[in-house]
Image (spheres, grey):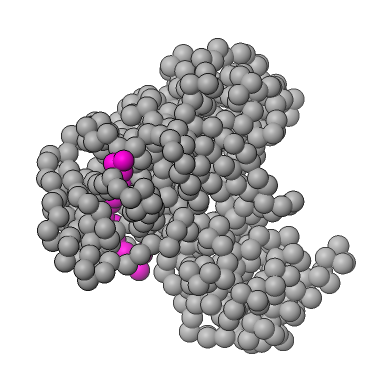
Amino acid sequence: MIQVVCVKQVPGTENRVKVAADGRSLDPAGVTWVLNPYDEYAVEQALRVRDEQGGGAVVAVSVGGPGVASALRNVLALGADRAVHLRTDVTAPDPLSLAHALAAELRGLGAGLVWFGKQAVDDDQAQVGPMTAELLGLPCATAAAAFVLEGEKATVEREIEGGHEVVELTLPAVVTAEKGLNEPRYASLKGIMAAKKKTVEEKPAELGEPGLEVVALVLPPSRAAGRIVGQGPGAVAELVRVLREDAKVI
Amino acid sequence: MSILVFIEQRDGQVRAISREALGEATRLAAALGGPVVGVCPAAADPGLAALGEAGADRVLLAGHPAFAACDASGYAGAVADAAAVLKPAVVLFGASTMGRDLAPRVAARLGTGLATDCTALTVEGGRLVASRPVFAGKALQKLTFRKVPALASLRPKMFAPVALAGKSAAVKPLAVEFDPAASRARVLRVVAAGAGKVDLTEAEVIVSGGRGMKGPEHFSLIEDLAAALGASVGASRAVVDAGWRPHSEQVGQTGKTVSPKLYVAVGISGAIQHLAGMTSSRCIVAVNKDPEAPIFKVADYGIVGDLFEVLPALTQAVGRLNAQA
C-alpha cells in the first residue's frame, strides 16, 4: 500500500513572533524552521503501518518555496521512501488553494492512506486535511489519538468534548494526527545518510484559487503586569479575598 | 442575504456553542441585513423552535435517522445543501470538535474560504473581517473573504449568546440525501470520560500543574483544588511529555488554547508556548517558588512560595468559602 504524508514546515514553537514590514506576515528574520510537530506523529504512524505490513511505500508531500526541501529531507531521514516537493512562490497559500494543490497530486498517487498533522502550529487553521479529503471524496478522521488498521478498515479514536469517539473508516482514507498518537522516532545517522540518496521530485504546485486574504497580522495586547499578593501559604487568605471581591471570579 | 448557522446537537440536546454562534449571527445580521437561519442535522427535532430566543429567525431541520450520531461527512451534505438553497452571505460554525471537522468539508464542497477558530468577527465597509489567533495566540491574524459565502468557525466561549424572550423560530424540514450504507466513515461508539468532566476549551475555571509538581503522584493536590473550584485540570507540555498527565490536558501550543474565567498556574514557569495558550484567560493566578518566573509577567495575582504548602492552604480556603455559600 502507498501512504502519503502531507507535511508543512513551520516556525519552531520556541520562536517569538515578529510582524514583517508589510503588516500582514511573519518577519522571517531569525526564525528557526521545523517540521510541524503534529506531522511527526503522522509520519511515525505511516512508517509503522508500512513496517507492520512489511512493504509498500511512504511518500512525503509538501507545498512551498525552496525551504520546504529541508522538511522533506527530515521526513526521508525518518524513513519515508520518497518525497514530492510541490513548488510555489506564493508565501503562505490559503487552506483552500493548498487543498486543491494536494488533491491534484494525490489523485495520481493512488494512496490507501493519506496522513496529515491535525493542524499546522503556524496558522492553526486545521482545515487542509479534511478539505483535501472532501475534494477527493475520501472519508476522514481528524485528530486521531489512536489508530488500528485491519485489512481495509481503519479504526480511529479521537477526543471529543467530554469523552472520545471511535470512528471506522474504509480505505482509502485521510487521517489527521493528534499529539500522543504514538512516540515519534528520531532520525538516525544511518537514516540521515540514506535520505541523501532518496529522490525529492520537484514539480510546480497547482494551487487553487484562494478563499481568504490576510489583511493584517498584529500582536495581541500585552497583559498589564499583575501583582504578587504575598509569599507562601500566609498569602492565601488575601488571594482568595481579591479573587472574590476584586476579580469576582470565585 | 441571510446568515446561516450550523446547529450542533448531541444526544438530542442543542449544544451551548450553537447558541454562541446564533448570538454572533444576530450581531452580524444587524450590520449585514437578512435573517438568521439555523441548519440542524439530527435524528429528531431537539427543540429547535426555542432557538428563537437565542436569535434564530428560522431553523432548517435536516432529519435523518443516521444523524443521531454521525461522522462530519454525513452532516456536510446537509449544511452545504442548506447553503445552496439559501445563498447566505455568511455561514457560522462553533469551533467544537464537530465544527472543526465539519466546516472545512463544507468549505471544500462550496469552494469557498473558511476562517477557523475565530475570536472576533467585524463588518468593515460591508465586508466581513475575521480575527483569529495564530501561532497559538502569539499573534492575531485578520482575514477577509474572497468568495461568497464567507465561512467562519467560532472559538468556544468567546461569543456571547443573546436572550430574546418570547421569540420563537419557525422550524422547516430540509430534504436530506444521505445513504449511510454508502458512507465510508462510521461512528462506532462515543465514550463519555466520566460524569461532570468538562473539556478544557469549555471550562470556566482551570487549574494547571507544571514541572514544579515534581511527579505525577502530586497531581492529587491539583485535583483537590480543581474539585473545590469546580475546575478542570490542565497541564504544561513538560509534564505531558514526561507522561505524568494525558495530552488531552495540555495547555499551550501543540495543546489546547483556553480562555476560562479563572486560570490557576501552579509550578509552571511560563514558557512562551504555554503562555500562548492561556493568556486570553480573564484572570490568571500563578503559584511559583521563583519570583522571576515569566508566568508572573502575565498573572493578575501571584503567590511566591512552595506550592506544596500553598496548594493545600488554598484548597482549604476555597472549601471554607464554599461552605459559607
Q: Is residue B293 left or right of residue B218?
A: left
Residue A8 on the magenta segment: yes
Question: Is A109 placed above or below A22 here?
Answer: above
Question: Is B312 placed above or below B230 here?
Answer: below
Q: Name the residue furthest front.
A: A54
- Residue shown at the point (38%, 62%) measured from the top left: A184
**Quadrant of the drawing holding the C terminus of chain B:** bottom right
Residue A138 on the magenta segment: no
- Residue shown at the point (48%, 21%) measured from the top left: B182
Q: Nearer the viewer, residue B268 or B165?
A: B268
Q: Position of residue A131 (x, y in %)?
A: 37, 35
Q: Is residue B146 left or right of residue B75?
A: left
Count of picture labels: 0
Question: Is B244 placed above or below A157 here?
Answer: below
Q: Is residue B224 left or right of residue A44?
A: right
Q: Nearer the viewer, residue B277 or A21?
A: B277
Q: Position of residue A5 (x, y in %)?
A: 30, 47
Q: Is residue B263 visible?
A: no
Q: Nearer the viewer, residue B157 or A21?
A: B157
Q: Name the residue furthest right.
A: B324
- Residue shown at the point (83%, 65%) measured from the top left: B322
- Residue shown at the point (56%, 62%) measured from the top left: B246
What segment carries the magenta color? A1-14
Q: Is residue B239 visible?
A: yes
Residue B10: image quadrant is top right
**Quadrant of the drawing holding the N terminus of chain B:** top left
Q: Position of residue A190 (x, y in %)?
A: 21, 68
Q: Position of residue B8 (x, y in %)?
A: 60, 32
